[in-house]
Image (cartoon, grey):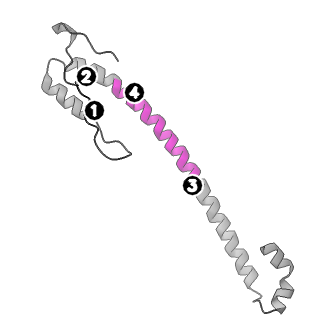
Amino acid sequence: MLTLAEAQKDALVAEGMSPRLLEDLGRLVAEFETVTEAARAAKLDHIGARADLELISGELTEQVKVLDGINRWRFGKDPELLVEWNAAKHVPSGSNGRVSPPAAGDGGVVPPESGGTAPTT
């Protein structure tokens, strides 16, 4: 529309339009396009960062599972340490900020030396 109005500028000015109106409008349209492009680029950056965060979170979750198996075996003879580990491994998630409760039966691991079996990881 701006391009069409600029082509008819003389007629529009003759009918009472301010001569600077199209210049101001052109500047505002250019600013709008710049801001719109910046917002689009920021959204794409946000999407990429979120994907990276999800990937890293998945890798960390797997590492905590490995540590859980090791520590559950290691702390199997000391129920107090096992309870502390169970509390430490449940951290607030990024989505709702709440702490995940320990899974049922987390405290009942018996290390192999006492006749039980080691947990699988």
Give neighbour class at mark 2: few <14, some 14-19, many 20+ (Cα, 10 Å). Answer: some
Q: Measured from the top left, where is residue 60 in percent x and y?
A: 39, 32
Name the residue that disc number 3 marks.
Answer: 42
Compared with residue 71, is residue 55 higher up or lower down, i.e. above or below? below
Q: Residue at x 43, y 30 (%)?
A: 59
Dot label at residue 62: 4
Q: Residue at x 45, y 35 (%)?
A: 56
Name the residue that disc number 1 marks.
Answer: 89
Q: Is residue 88 left or right of residue 55?
A: left
* Disc with the residue nearer the chain's start (1 vs 3): 3
Q: Is residue 22 magenta?
A: no
Q: Amino acid at mark 1?
A: Lys
- Residue closest to the eye, 12 or 45: 12
Name the residue that disc number 2 marks.
Answer: 71
* Disc with the residue nearer the chain's start (4 vs 3): 3
Q: CA distance from mark 2 to mark 4?
A: 14 Å
Q: Which residues are magenta?
A: 42-65
Compared with residue 63, is residue 93 higher up or lower down, i.e. above or below? below
- Do tag 1 and tag 2 residues touch (Cβ < 8 Å)? yes
Q: Amino acid at mark 2?
A: Asn
Quick one: SS at disc 3? helix
- Residue closest to the eye, 84 or 107: 107
Q: Measured from the top left, where is residue 15 in percent x and y?
A: 82, 92
Give neighbour class at mark 4: few <14, some 14-19, many 20+ (Cα, 10 Å). Answer: few
Q: CA distance from mark 4 to mark 1?
A: 12 Å
Specify the quadrant that holds the C terminus: top left
- Examine the image and state in which quarter residue 61 appears: top left
Specify the quadrant that holds the N terminus: bottom right
